[in-house]
Amino acid sequence: MKKSRINIIILYLVIFASFAFSMQLFVPVNDPVYDYLERQATRGYIPEFMNDSRPLQRDEIASWLLIMQNKKNELHRVDRELLTNYIGEYRHELTDNKHPALADTNDYRLGFSSWSNIKDDMHSLFSDRPIEEEKHIYLMEDGDNTLWINADFMVRGEGKNNILRFVDRLGAEAAMQIGDHLSMFVDGYFFHQYLPDDWREPVKEFKGNWFNDHEYEHFATFDRSEAYVNVTGKF
């Protein structure tokens, strides 16, 4: 009974917060969309864009992308393709359309729930078509609420003076937006780096992070996680 009361109290608090404040997800400061918009500002398309105001909210980024969309025909082909990708990424802020992977009658999609979905996701992963919107492992959109979950894996090799080193990243991230009033984000990543004897300095991802101690002399690891609930509005 006590646990049930706690759950009810939490539910009421969430509902109250969702009606009391306007909330939007922030775009991480290392997102490449900032570099794209800064480049267009340098070229004179959006000179008002202030790149030192990071992080911006998603709806703010979307408004700058919409301005660029109206100038699309003036852009170089590569920048037009990048813009198409970003317009798709910020679809939720720009239109009322569902994710293109969702059928008109469905509110959710689980990527590995069918062989058809797996083939479609693999094709999207290796396709370079600018119209492709990211396919999430789990996606739910019902018109008012959105939830998506992703997994991420990366391996990179680097060379210098005939020496090779490797770094990999494994992690997951999730985002939720309830109506126009409640937004949450969480991610977690684990990094490994191979350390050759003659090239011991860390890769860029490791800088500023604490190395985990372990028994393998030629490996360095660290983990990183972030989470926030974004609150904006009049208090």
Image (cartoon, grey):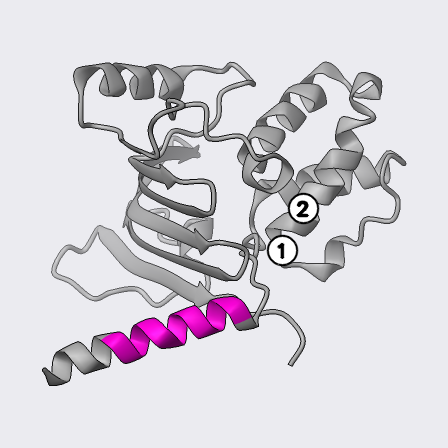
Which quarter of the image is occupied by the N terminus?
bottom left
Q: Is 20 positioned to the left or the right of 76 in the image?
A: left
What residue do we see at 22% from left, 50% from top? 218
| Res 86 seen here | yes
What residue do we see at 30% from left, 59% from top? 223
Q: Are marks 2 and 1 in contact (CB under 8 Å)?
A: yes
Q: Give the residue at mark 1.
A: 57
Amino acid carrying mark 1 in the image: Gln
Q: Which residues are magenta?
A: 8-19
What residue do we see at 45% from left, 29% from top? 99
The x and y percentages for residue 160 are: 44, 35
C-alpha separation, residue under disc 2 versus residue under disc 1 = 6 Å
Is label 1 in a helix, a strand or a loop?
loop
Foreground of the two, 188 or 102:
102
What residue do we see at 53% from left, 61% from top? 181
Is label 2 in a helix, a strand or a loop?
helix
The x and y percentages for residue 49 are: 81, 49
**Magenta span includes 12:** yes
| Res 195 seen here | no
Foreground of the two, 145 or 159:
145
Q: Residues within 10 Å of mark 1 (few under 14, many from 20)?
A: some
Q: Which quadrant would residue 2 be assigned to in this image?
A: bottom left
In the orientation shown, which residue stands out farthest toward the bottom? 2
Foreground of the two, 7 or 168:
7
Q: Is 149 positioned to the left or the right of 58 in the image?
A: left
Q: Give the residue at mark 2.
A: 61
- Please tell me whether the stretch drawn in magenta is mainly helix, strand or loop: helix
